Image (spheres, rainbow, N blue to C red):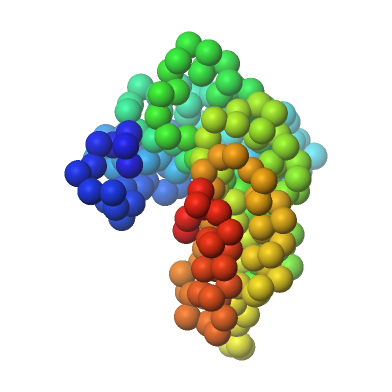
Amino acid sequence: LEYFKFDRQDAMQVTWSHGANSKAQLAEALASDVHMLEADILLRGQGTHAQTDIPVMAHPPQTDSDNTFQEWLDAALESSKGLKLDFKSIGSVAPSLRRVLVVNKSNRINRPVWLNADILRGPNTANPGVDPREFIDTVNRIFPECTLSIGWTTGFYYDRENEGYTRQMVEEMHSYCGDLKQPITFPIRNSLLSLPGTLENLEWLLSQSERSEF
């Protein structure tokens, strides 16, 4: 909020461009008046026999893009917009952050940087997410000067009852983030907020630290 020089301390004023992955999507976002660019990162060929160690901007089930992370970063830094990097695989984290670190040595990253990953299994899914300890340790080792955005994988059923965010889920999250030094935000699925116990459990998680928010 300080970076964008808002008159009021209200995060609702921040506008986002989601999924600014391809060169065309990024160009559209850069030409807009949004404050934050959000984009997804995985390794080229992720999960295939052709997987490489090159981070590219794509959201599963896509495994390739016309935009490498390096190209995306160079273009994004020509603007004054903040960055949210959404890691879709643990293997893409270290090579991407090493590129961020190199660029930052010339003081080009003078803006908000959010590093996001779904690190725990959440409601209505069997997807475990990326490895929580490896993600947090990699961030702290390479580029700790960020806002950590750590959440749960989620699903939603249209033909049966859904589960909300349980106390066990928020306590597990706290076990990973309780000692972290960065500001923390927890991305959540809005469609689950009305389920019994969800708000109470999320409020408990927020109450454990003054550095956290949804």
- How many numbered tags mark residues here? 0
Task: In the rendered view, tell whether residue 153 sits above or below residue 135.
Answer: below
Relative to 209, 52 lies left or right: right
- Residue extending furthest toward the bottom: 160
**Residue 166, picture quadrant:** bottom right
Residue 24 point in image, percent of width and height: 38, 37
25 to the left or right of 115: left
In front: 61, or 143? 143
Q: Is residue 63 visible?
A: no
Residue in the image at 53% along x and 13% along y: 105
Question: Considering depth in this image, is 102 or 214 the residue closer to the camera?
Answer: 214
The image quarter containing residue 40 is: top right
| On-image quarter of the N terminus | top left
Which residue is situated farthest in the top direction here?
106
List x then y, in percent, for residue 3: 32, 34
Q: Which residue lies at the image location 66% right of the left edge and 57% below the top edge?
A: 174
Instruction: Tell which of 2 and 151 is nearer to you.
Output: 2
Task: Say above or below: 13 vs 157.
Answer: above
Height in image: 189 above or below 10? Answer: below
The residue depicted at 51 percent of the width and 74 percent of the height is 199
